[in-house]
Image (cartoon, rainbow, N blue to C red):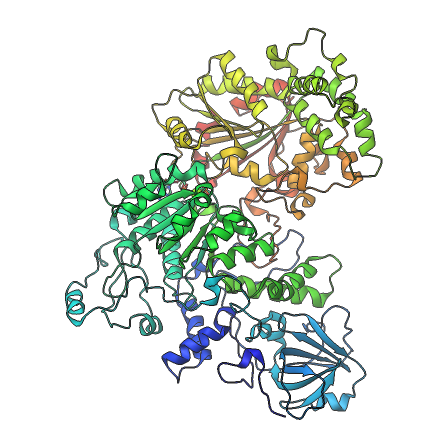
Amino acid sequence: MRRSAAPSQLQGKPFKKPKFIPPARSNPSLNAEITKLDPDMQLSEVAADNTLLQSQADPTIYSLNLLPAEDSGREMNHGETCAVPAFNLHHTVHSSPEDLTVSKGQEVEPGSVVKYFTVVWCKASKKKHKKWEGDAVLIVNGKSLTLKDLEGKDIGRGTGYKFKELEKIEEGHTMMIGGKEIEIMGSISPDDFSSGRCFQLGGGGPAISSSSQAAKKCFSNPLKSVYKPSSKENRQNSFQNCKPRHDPCAPNSLVMPRPDKNHQWMFNKNCFPVVDVVIDPHLAYYLRPHQKEGIIFLYECVMGMRVNGRCGAILADEMGLGKTLQCISLLWTLQCQGPYGGKPIIKKTLIVTPGSLVNNWRREFQKWLGSERIKIFTVDQDHKVEEFIKSPLYSVLIISYEMLLRSLDQIKNIKFDLLICDEGHRLKNSAIKTTTALISLACEKRIILTGTPVQNDLQEFFALIDFVNPGILGSLSSFRKIYEEPIIVSRQPSASKEEKELGERRAAELVCFTGLFFLRRTQEVINKYLPPKIENVVFCRPGALQLELYQKLLNSQAVRFCLQGSLENSPHLICIGALKKLCNHPCLLFNSIKEKECSSTWDENEESSLYEGLINVFPADYNPLMFTEKESGKLQVLTKLLAVIHELRPTERVVLVSNYTQTLNILQEVCKRHGYAYTRLDGQTPVSQRQQIVDGFNSKYSSDFIFLLSSKAGGVGLNLIGGSHLILYDIDWNPATDIQAMSRVWRDGQKHPVHIYRLLTTGTIEEKIYQRQISKQGLSGAVVDLAKTSEHIQFSVEELKNLFTLHESSHCVTHDLLDCDCAGERDHTGDSLEKFPVSRNCQLGPHHKKSDSLKPLSMSQLKQWKHFSGDQLNLKDPFLDRIRENVSFFFQNITNQNTAALLGKVTS
Ligand SMILES: Nc1ncnc2c1ncn2[C@@H]1O[C@H](COP(=O)(O)OP(=O)(O)OP(=O)(O)O)[C@@H](O)[C@H]1O
Ligand SMILES: [Mg+2]
């Protein structure tokens, strides 16, 4: 029987032995292109070249920060480099506990032989000349056969075969399985099966199945915008000017890697001399080492030097590492230089960013390049895209995601050579308009910048990868079967050893491959440039009115209804909202009750059963506008804290964060009452004014003492280094929101030691939310994501019972849960935090060692923080000492060991 037309084998030679072809290179169009360029050059050689490329470069550049789950006993020794595992030709193994063999439901027969084969299949028929319908993978396990298509789906099963028959299986052998006829094409190593590589052998695979335009045309020339065929004369002229723009031999010069022979052969068709691309020394002078590495990484990615013909990258450095400067350096370099004849690589760049950061980008351009070198255009109400189109002056267009949607038609008509999507984790949802709009742009050099972990959800991770390098991971359905499902199954407590190993291998493969164009570094790389950070969790005693109202709320009909068990139509979110308001200040609850009383739906409203009788707890003449600080434990602590900062550090400033506008109103009123100059940024602040407000606060001439910030409205990406004290007045379910806010002040450029205060009301729901943030339960959900709110959280009745319990007698419920031997009675100082592993919820599993400081810390880490009760006398920290009267418990941690010497200054 002859093989006629299995889809994945229509182009290129049919293979006998499977070869490792990473997803990007297994693409028929790539294969065709290479064949066209050099008939003698085989795809496998190109793949080998790419592997080489990978190992040549600086290993640290490949580090992906995909960290182990806390409970994982195993650590794969990935180290810094992540070389693609060598192809293993051993294809027959005896099953043993180590074998990575079967899918769920298949029993491994002791001592039996497990083999894997590539096959072609068609429906069983008596026709002499078969028309093969597709490629598949055959698993022979004992007497059982399983057939999987290249998307990983089971398409046939059979049992009861004779051992003798199965032993004879070899290339060319045909057999029947589950109503399908198959022909064996070759064998596969267990290694190739367990890593998932065998599924990438061409069919149904990358690029072909992706819907995007760019995916269909995946083998692109990263230099094509530059290489217009020139006349001989022009070329000769160019040859004469072929000098590096900056001296590559000057001390501290940063020179980009030269393209290798393969790259030159493919992209330097005009045979221009290869010229060093050198980062402008003006910029190189300021660059931190990790930024230099980052620029080289980005350069290699967009030049197609890492994965042939792919020009996308994701720079996922933690917040504050200077992703903006790295991009500006890249853009400025590519706009002026190139490796072939020195010709520039790009002409126009599009930067898409959240509205509040449009002007931040402008400022950063100005800060690093001044106003003369490069002309940038920012789109706002008064400056439309038309202006950019008409003027030849501008090479960079900066626009918000919202404006992009409105001006999409015009933007599509502009030829951009580089696209940068800042805070690009929003593109993780490929169905939203913003993503489809950006996908529709023809630009192939795409960079996503994000400081938020994106590996926690593999489908979202897939969407981001697919955006920058369309089709590189195949179709979503095959990705799910081959990577996501085994990886998730392997993380379940019930997973078998085989499932665990299979999941780990697939994750390793994915990390390894995506590491070619995904880079994440952690805060630690800039710690040494930053002052110390003193983080405090402050447990504030609730006021008497708060306690009475809290008890009453917990005894309400609405709360009791929530605890009855039926969570459908349960008003638990309303109950949680009311308790959170009460923790911030009773007057907020008072306002809600009054508002509801006035509404026409008061009687039928669930809130009426929650608020019943509450108003009587307030004094008869209660006026929310005349609220007092004493009524709220946290507000009392806050006012004392502001006073002590003002007194002891008169030149320093405070960023005061809440997620609620109404709470910010109260805090603003406190500022007024105490005569503190303040400025405010929340959801209502017009985008055009935001940068001005930020700049004003950061300026050394600013008279503002306090920056009132709604973190949800505009915290992402902001630099608020004018402030060195940050107070989180309320807690969010989502740790990412709080971490984003905290990262605003402890960043490059900060001159003072940074003090962070997280205020929590002792024994209340705020403590529970905090525990949820730091406990495993909090980590296992998809909460580490800015888009997730409490509406996305599923609660069990047990959890609700816990949430709706007040612990009046405890100094700190969180400490009670830590199982700590100090019993909260003494100044307990644990070992250095850095010694303890950080818990992770990355779906990719235990493959990387570096910690990720953006993740909320775990309970066990918290235990290592210094902690003490508020009753303790003589606190060394003068700020804490002043507030301790209203505080039942403190946790404190000081980060940045290398600058801890300054601590004397901090606490003296
Ligand atoms: N090499 C450097 N030297 C001095 N300051 C720097 C350097 N690199 C960056 N900065 C400054 O550090 C601050 C943070 O940089 P940037 O806003 O680019 O961070 P980011 O990585 O984008 O963080 P986020 O994820 O929060 O947006 C900026 O004020 C920037 O100008
Ligand atoms: Mg940024």
For the residue pair 71 and 658, the one nearer the viewer reads as 658
Residue at left offset 57%, top offset 44%: 855
For the residue pair 126 and 104, the one nearer the viewer reads as 126
x, y percent for residue 167: 72, 89
* The N terminus: image quadrant: bottom right
x, y percent for residue 503: 65, 64
Residue at left offset 82%, top offset 26%: 557
Instruction: Specify the quarter for ligand 1.
Output: top left
Q: Count the numbered circles shown.
A: 0
Q: Residue furthest top?
A: 621
- Above or below, 466 against 128 in this view is above
- Above or below, 537 against 11 in this view is above
Residue at left offset 30%, top offset 51%: 332
- Above or below, 64 against 381 in this view is below
Q: Is residue 329 left or right of residue 870?
A: left
Q: Quadrant of residue 867?
A: top right
Q: Is residue 329 at all visible to an observer of this figure?
A: yes
x, y percent for residue 719: 42, 35
Q: Residue furthest right?
A: 564
